[in-house]
Image (spheres, rainbow, N blue to C red):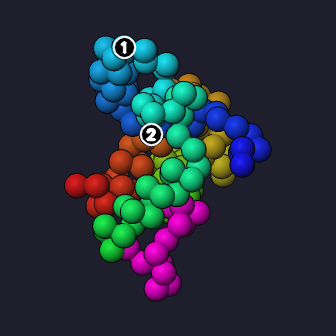
Amino acid sequence: MERKNGPGTVSLLTGLDAIDERIDALARRDGWAGYVFPAARRASGHISPSTVRRRFKRLAGAANVRVDGERPTPKHGRRFWYTAYGDAVRRAGECFADIADEQGSSDPSAVTGNYFSDAERRRHRRAEMREELSGLFG
């Protein structure tokens, strides 16, 4: 069954140096189609949802992870990710609460939204996510 929104793009919260290294390594491969996580055995160049589920199940089993006594599903992984990401975005915004207050605003997003570039906002979110995930990925 095809996904309703099909293959698309996602934000990768990683340093630019890491993604540059990955792209350089992939670009040296013959026939690279531009996917950061290519599927060598698929003509489409991307992996199917069932492959993702199978890999997630295998990874959760190897790590002996349980959620409410059951092996987690990709939905649990997405739930964790979005919760952690939301917390990181909130913390990144709270860093500028004092500045917003000095400018007469009770909302720190007034500072980040009006005075930071998209790249600068991403940099702050990445830093917060790096902190959030550091305990999981040594």
Q: Are marks 2 and 1 in contact (CB under 8 Å)?
A: no
Q: CA distance from mark 2 to mark 1?
A: 27 Å
Q: Earlier in the sequence, mark 2 or mark 1?
A: 2
Label placed on residue 13: 2
Q: Position of residue 23 (x, y in %)?
A: 37, 21
Pick whichever, 1 or 79, lies toward us: 1
The residue shown at (31%, 60%) is 136
Q: Is residue 54 visible?
A: yes
Amino acid of disc 2 = Leu
Q: With 66 as the anchor, is 76 left or right in this view?
A: right
Residue drawn at x 42%, y 49% as measured from the top left: 129
Residue 45 colored in magenta in the image:
no
Mark 1 Cα-neighbour bin, 10 Å: few <14, some 14–19, many ≥20? few
Q: Secondary structure at mark 1?
A: loop
Closest to the observer, 99 or 138: 138
Please state the extent of the stretch shown in magenta in the rendering: 65-77
Which SS type dominates the magenta stretch?
Answer: loop
Query: What is the secondary structure assignment of the residue under circle 2?
Result: loop
The answer to if 73 sits in the magenta stretch is: yes
Checking the image for residue 68, the label placed there is none
**Measured from the top left, where is residue 135 in percent x and y?**
29, 61
- Which residue does the image show at 59% across and 49% down from the upper left? 49
> Which residue in the rendered view is the most extreme toward the bottom?
69
Near mark 2 (Cα within 10 A), the count class, few <14, some 14-19 or many ≥20, is some
The image quadrant of residue 64 is: bottom left
> Could you tell me residue 22's position as x and y percent?
33, 26
Q: Which residue is mark 1?
A: 30
User: At 64% from the left edge and 33% from the top edge, which residue is drawn?
Assistant: 8
Task: Locate the C terminus by quadrant.
Answer: bottom left
The answer to whether residue 20 of the structure is visible from this angle is: no
**Closer to viewer: mark 2 or mark 1:** 1
